[in-house]
Amino acid sequence: MITMLRLLCFTLLIQSVSSPSIHPDFSGTWALRSLDGDPGNQQIGSQLMSERILAITQTDKQIDVGRGDRKRMIDMIYLFGSKGSGNAYWDGKKLVISRTMELSANNEKSTLQVKEEWSLGSEGGGLIIQMSILTRRGYANYQLYYKKQ
């Protein structure tokens, strides 16, 4: 009985040490490689293309995302666990971020609802962000591909 208990404990220990983390770690600096999406919405597409660099720091409780280019970075912090706007939660191995953005163009203000689903490509294939944006004209969907620097 004691031998069986030792074997069970040893097996559980090996599994916990050898098991990969439940959630991927997106930490690091990522450079935008390509953007696929709605060609009809030029304003959103050009805004996404201006966010060429992602600087990410991730802990168990939050993810800190700097977006921009070499000259200007906008820093946003998302707390894990809440499905409200401006927060992040895990859906299996995907990170889901929802946020509200206020834009101003041609003296008109508009509100965008943005939902992002982050995942890592197979075998270190990079960061893939599926983005769905609700505007007053409807939905625009994009897929952004980043390569780790």
Image (tube, rainbow, N blue to C red):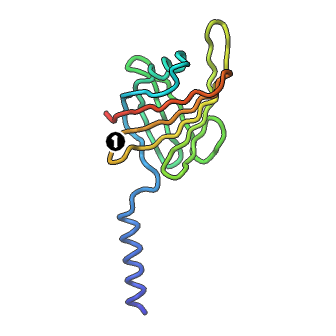
When the figure is inspected, residue 46 is found, relative to residue 148, above or below; the finding is above
The percent position of residue 33, horizontal first and vertical second, equals 36, 28
- Callout 1 amino acid: Gly
Q: Which residue is mark 1?
A: 125
Name the residue at the top extreme. Answer: 106
Characterize the local packing of mark 1: few (<14), some (14-19) or many (20 or more) Cα atoms within 10 angstroms. Answer: few
Q: Secondary structure at mark 1?
A: loop
**Viewport quadrant of the N terminus:** bottom left
Can residue 109 be seen by looking at this rendering?
A: yes
Q: Quadrant of residue 70?
A: top left
When the figure is inspected, residue 54 is found, relative to residue 137, above or below; the finding is below
Q: Residue 110 versus residue 65: which sits nearer the camera?
A: 110
**Viewport quadrant of the C terminus:** top left
When the figure is inspected, residue 102 is found, relative to residue 25, above or below; the finding is above
- Number of callouts: 1
The percent position of residue 28, horizontal first and vertical second, equals 37, 37
At 49% across and 27% down in the image, what residue appears? 37
Indicate left or right for 116 with 1 as reference.
Answer: right
The percent position of residue 128, horizontal first and vertical second, equals 43, 38
The percent position of residue 108, horizontal first and vertical second, equals 67, 10
At 46% across and 56% down in the image, what residue appears? 22
When the figure is inspected, residue 57 is found, relative to residue 67, above or below; the finding is below
Can residue 111 be seen by looking at this rendering?
A: no
Q: Residue 122 versus residue 84: which sits nearer the camera?
A: 122
Indicate left or right for 138 with 39 as reference.
Answer: right
Q: Residue 27 versus residue 130: which sits nearer the camera?
A: 130
Name the residue at the bottom extreme. Answer: 1
Indicate left or right for 23 with 122 as reference.
Answer: right
